[in-house]
Image (cartoon, rainbow, N blue to C red):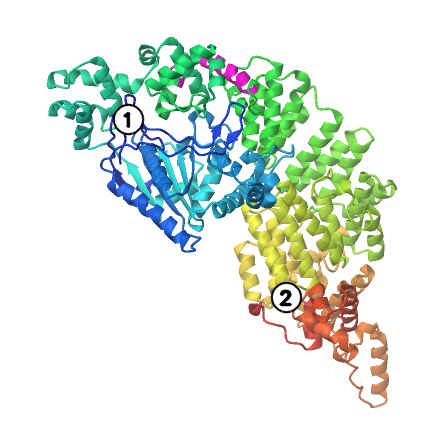
Amino acid sequence: MTLMSQQLPMASRFESSSDGGPAQSGRQPARATIISRPDHALRRWRGPRVTEHGSADARHEPAELEQPHLYERESALQDAQQALDRLRVEYAAGGVELGSLLLYSGKAGMGKTTMLQQIRALAGAQGITVLSGRAGEQRIKEPFHLLRQLLLGELSALSTGQLDEVLGEWHAVAGPALGLVPPTGEDLDPQSVQQGLDVVMTQLARVRAPLVMLVDDLQWADQESLVWLESLAVRCPELPLLLAIAWRTGELPDRVRGFRSLVAGNSHRHLEFQGLTPPAVGKLVREVFQDAEDSFIRQVWAVTDGNPFLVNALLAKVRESGIEPVQENMPLLHDLAAEAQGMDSDYWMGKLSIEALKFAQAAAMLDTEILPRVATRIAALSPATAAAAIAELRRHQVLTGPADGPLEFVHPLLATSLYQSIRPAIRTAMHGKAAVELENAGRPLVESSRHLLETYPDDEREVVVKLRRAAREHLAVGAPDAAVRCLERALAEPPEDEIRARVIYELACATLLTDPIATANQLKLALDTVPGLPADLRVDAVFRLSEVLAHSGRLGEATDLTLAEAQRTDPGPGRTRLAVAHFMWAAFQRDEADGPGRSSRLADLASGMPGDDVNARAARALRAWDLTLRGSSVTRVQALLDSALDQGRLPAELGWTTNPWGLELPGIIALTHIYTDRLDRAEQLIDDAIWAFGVAGWEGAHLGIAVFLMGLAKFRRGALAEAEVELRNALRIARRVGPDLPLQWDAVGVLADTLLARGRVEEARKLAADYSFAPPYHPDAIVLPDAATLYGKLLLAQRDREGAVGVLRGVGEQLTARGWHNTIWAPWAGHLAQALYPERPEEARELAEWHVQRARIFGVASAVGSALRMNAAVVEGQLAVVCNADGLVHRARRELNAAGLRPNLPRSTGRDALSRNEWRVAELIVDGLTPSQIAERLDVSVSLINRRIAAVHRKTGSDVEGLAAALGLAVERPDSD
């Protein structure tokens, strides 16, 4: 490793944590030593140039004209050169997945930055595009700061067509975080933003391949950039990208566990830089003092521990002091080294003029990408005085960069020491001044707000206003943690009593997607604060609190909260909204003391609002779902549902992302379509949800629920292969969002049912076991469809009849008490009949007949067909169940027996009952084709195919699941899909 010496030293910065570094992996990192030449000044590359007006200059600075002469770094440089050669050659040969990762760690001043600069020079010599960025110690609270350094310049240089290609459909989601487009004002899901940034990086790597990315001072990266970089480091081998990262040993934040594991692994090259060896220090000293005595050189090495930065600083102090490098002056080295290392206010006052020190301290407030005009105003200097100060700081090699900016510190240690040299009280005042001057310069609030965070609370109304605005901007780019910092600081200012509850409410909303526990606590505090929230905002806060409780599995609390608040709210839209929310959460509760009573109250609410406003439509939609679960007439259900919709589609005020009740309400409408055989409408509605969530950037639980609903619809349609794909995707999203949420239970249950329908009993059993899909199920929420019924069906498929009987009897008692008799949602009676049949055939037949009766009351064709199929499994003889001639068959048999005649077998209800066209459709259904695929195969309309499918189910008395058995067709094995 090498480092070039200067009149003031240069070195590198990144540090790895000791507990996450190579020591854990059981191998020692390669030792790297550094020697630098004192007569060469290093010109740092600073990333995309930011002008005084804040725009990114896409032009790259030229590579350094003069590179330092390096010592003891041949091996590391050779590794870097080989990685670059491989990247260039293999990409030219058509390779794509050829990325590699170079990792550098070490204490401050060990030369990590110099190594990155050498890689930049090597890449530039080969014509490879280089992206570079350095995190700043003072900008760690500025979201996406490092990300923008790395990508904004290159993205800004793309043509309009290329930029559209790179951003694609993620323009509105990733664009604000990158600084390419202004935020829309809508809060963005942080996970969606990170996913969008991953896609953008993948596309940029393809458009600008091959790429080299250099990241310095990772330990100071802002949280949002750090999350993105951690993901990029893991998938780097998949891209045409050489990624080199440097950090300070022992300073990586605890939260980067994935990156720590990457460092500890053996798959990437990791160098931990050590101090210079005595011979290397000797070469460095003699380049400054050719006649230095050996004993003097050994003492230089001893007092600096071989740290290149300190060696350079000490040599500069020796030269300034005019002492000779001889043995008798060795005792002076210890004090000089301490002075060089400390660089406190006395050091800088002795080295710089007052004006230069004031400008340097103002620059330290800005840290990186220093705009001279802004620093001049912070330092309260005239333009001419500032220009002279900049020239002086360049001479002392404190700052570097063009005269019009942006300026950079030659080394971050200099920025740190200058920042710390400011007295605390003055430092706080300078942060306040920096916030004002950055805003006056047209910089965004996300940049100036970090300075407001460092000021003392002083009861200033304007500060509260700015921090609230900054929080909204942070949320609009997908940085809720930064928004929380701003709002917490606003509360400390403090705000006026009249708006304090509102600020607390905004703080709660900022953590809605990331910390539900904090959100719930803050919402409760906002509701209890006096003076309180305005009436409309209080209703919104109550609903959001109920939403957090419900999504956290505390449905009972959500139900009770909305009921109590509705009762205390004055009559009007707010009260109705809370009443609707109460019934919505109650519909998802697993246990309910008075199900019929709640159903009656919901009926009163729906019938009392005959209009078409959003509350009336919502109440009718909930009533339709309630009747669906109760197994009431499908004609009545569909009439209610149609009255809640606008010509069969969601009205704008009930949209997936725009309605006052969250995704549950349109989700209930989709479920009602699914369980009343309106599968085309359901799938169209769910397609709309997936599109809306994508536009809004909601790629977490919202998207997971939509994908699950699509899987459920595909399962109900009989498209089992497609259903399995959707349900596995939903399960993947559920695992990413968090364990044991209702979404995970839903996905596991229907996926297990799908596997059973495809004949993969053992796979279904293992899935249920892996996710503990067994009693007591989710503690508070129902599972879609009924979990206990699915579990009983799974036991029955494994021939555990006794276990199935126990489970299914309990289901029947619970659902009957609640008044829920939907035979599609919970066909417990049909499965219980099959479980009982070998031992108690009479009871089994009674249950099966009751199951058929309930299905006929409901009136949904698939429900009737499924019930008849289950009935056929337990009824002796070939009964003409499909034509409702059960009694006639019994009479006919008695009469024939009395006459001494044997009855002929009834005519087949399968093959012979179907027309040729219906038979062909039935075969394709069994093969797993969807109606649209069948229509395309047979070259007829989808509506005609749907009519033929209905005829098939009606004539065979079977749903999709039992169609193959009813017709004697072989089911295509699932492994063939």
* Residue 229 in sight here: yes
- Placement of 665 over or under 496, stated as above or below: below
- Mark carried by residue 88: none
The residue at which mark 1 appears reads as 309
Q: Amino acid at mark 1?
A: Phe
Q: Position of residue 623 (x, y in %)?
A: 80, 47
Quick one: which residue is furthest to the bottom in this view?
A: 900
The location of residue 147, given as percent across then percent down, is 48, 35
Nearer to us in this view, 382 or 836: 382
Q: Who's the residue at 69% across and 46% down the image?
A: 589
375 displayed left or right of 926: left
**SS class, disc 1:** helix
Can you tell which quarter of the image residue 664 is in? Answer: top right
Residue underneath mark 2: 757
- The quadrant of the rendering that contains the C terminus is bottom right
Does the rendering let one see residue 249? Answer: no
Q: Is residue 910 above or below residue 828?
A: below
Residue at x 85%, y 52% (from the top left corner)? 639
Magenta stretch encompasses residue 428: yes
Q: Which residues are magenta?
A: 419-439
Q: Which amino acid lies under the numbered mark 2 shown in the image of this protein?
A: Ala
Task: Mark 2 vs mark 1: give the one in front.
Answer: 1
Q: Which tag, 2 or 1, sits closer to the chain's start?
A: 1
